[in-house]
Amino acid sequence: MQILTLTTDNGTKDHYVASIKGKVLSLYTSATIIDISHDIRPFDISEAAYQVRNCYRDFPMGTVHVIGVDSEPQIAPGTDDGMYPSILKFQGQYFISNDNGFFGAFLLQDEPDEFYQVQSIIEEGKHYTFPTKQLLIPLACRILNGDSIPSFATPKERFKRAYSPSVLVETNVIKGYVVHIDAFGNLISNIHKSYFERYSKDVPYTIYYRNKEYFIEQVSLGYNAVPPGEKVAIFNSNDFLEIAINRGANGTSGGVEQLCGVRIGDMIRIEFTPRGSHENFDSLFGL
C-alpha cells in the first residue's frame, strides 16, 4: 500500500481537491489518498507545518506528504532567492512542498535526512497554474513509483524557514504563544511538557492567558477532569500545553477562543513559585 497525504488551503467548496485526487489516481492508480486538512488559512505555511508535524508520526515509513499551500514557484535563476518545488526526506517519510518556509517550520530544530530541489520547472511555465496538481503531485507519484529522487531533483543543503515564535524560559517563568486554535476553540500553545519537567512536581504554578484575569493553577489529565463549562489545561497527545473549556464549543460558541477573546499569537505565561521566589505578578505583564 502506497500512501499519499494532502494538506492544502483549497477548502472543500470548490472542485480543487477532487481535481488533485484525480491527478494522483491518473498517475498512480493504486495510491491510498489521506486528507490531513484542506482548511489551512490561505498561504499560511506555519499552520500547514503545524498540522503535518502533529500527525506524520502516525503514518508508516515511505508515506509521501504533499503540502499544497503557497505552492506557486518564484523563479530566481542563479540565486537562492527563488521558491521551487522541493522534497524533504525525514524519518523515512517524504514531504513535498514549495520551498516557501514550510520545511523550516515543519522541522523546527530537527535536521533533514535529505533535501532536494526541482528547478527544471524554469522551462515549464505552463504548469504554474494550479501548481499543487501540475507540479507537486507528479513529483509525489514519481516517488510512489520508486523513481530515484536524484534522477529528477538536485540535492541542496539549505531551505527557507518561516518565522515561528519561540518559547522564552526565564527564572521561574515560561512564556509561550498560542500557535493554533482547533475546531473546538481550544488553544494549542508551543509550550512543551518538557519545560514543566524542569521543575519539581510539588512546585506550584499558575498559567495565565490573555491577561491576569484568566488563569489556571493546574494541568489536568483530560477535559472531563473539570465540570462542563469550566476552563481546563492539559498536555495534548503531542505533549503541548492546551487550554480549553470542557464542552465549551456547542455550535454557537467557540470555546476559549470566543469566550475569552484569545487569538493565535497571544502570549501564555506560566509563573512557578518555589518557596521564597514569588514575584510580583503585575511586573510580569509590565503593569
Image (cartoon, helix red, strand yellow):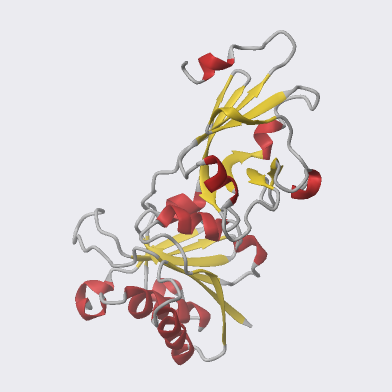
Count up the numbered dots. 0
Is residue 110 something one can see in this rendering? no
* Rendered view: 280 above or below 145: above
* Residue found 21% across the figure and 63% down from its top: 75
Image spot of residue 70 (x, y percent): 34, 63
Residue farthest front in this picture: 252
Q: Nearer the viewer, residue 114 or 194?
A: 194
Q: Nearer the viewer, residue 100 or 14?
A: 14
Q: Quadrant of residue 63?
A: bottom right
Image spot of residue 145 (x, y percent): 50, 84
* Rendered view: 29 above or below 268: below
Q: Is residue 34 left or right of residue 9?
A: right
Q: Is residue 4 left or right of residue 199?
A: left
* Residue found 51% across the figure and 41% down from its top: 262
Residue farthest top in this picture: 276
* Rendered view: 59 above or below 256: below
